[in-house]
Amino acid sequence: MIKNLWKKFVNWLFSWQKKEPVILEDEEEYLEDEAKMAQYLEDKIIEPEKIKCNTHLRFKKSCPTCVEAAK
């Protein structure tokens, strides 16, 4: 009895590794549309201009040049 319970437990524990995902026909079309939409949105994204200060690489709140460049 214990052997049977142990076998069921081990099968249950490792059963998630054996299952392969089921892909439906509509899901493939959905994934293609999703990829096209993601590419379209990436093309539309406009990145803000970076604030440049010649004294250091990053924006510093205490630097008057950085504060002036941010305005």
Image: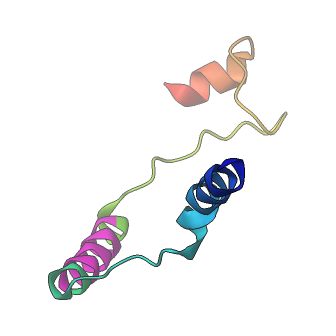
Estimate the x, y position of residue 42 in percent, counting from the top left. Answer: 37, 67
Q: Is residue 56 magenta?
A: no
Within the image, what quadrant is residue 31 found in? bottom left
Q: Is residue 40 magenta?
A: yes
Within the image, what quadrant is residue 52 found in? top right
Identity of the residue furthest to the left in this view: 26
Judge whether 36 appears above or below 49 on screen: below
Side (left or right) of 31 relative to 62? left
Q: Residue at x 46, y 78 (%)?
A: 20
Q: Residue at x 30, y 82 (%)?
A: 23
Side (left or right) of 69 relative to 56? left
Q: Residue at x 34, y 75 (%)?
A: 39
Estimate the x, y position of residue 55 in percent, counting from the top left. Answer: 84, 34
Q: Give the colouring mode of the picture.
A: rainbow
Within the image, what quadrant is residue 37 found in? bottom left
Q: Residue at x 35, y 59 (%)?
A: 45
Identity of the residue furthest to the right in this view: 55
Estimate the x, y position of residue 14 in percent, counting from the top left. Answer: 63, 62
Viewer-closest of 18 and 59: 18
Viewer-closest of 37 and 23: 23
Estimate the x, y position of residue 12 in percent, counting from the top left. Answer: 56, 57
Side (left or right) of 20 relative to 2? left
Magenta extent? 29-41
Instruction: Give the main secondary structure, helix, strand or loop, of the magenta stretch.
Output: helix
Side (left or right) of 29 relative to 63? left
Judge whether 40 appears above or below 49 on screen: below
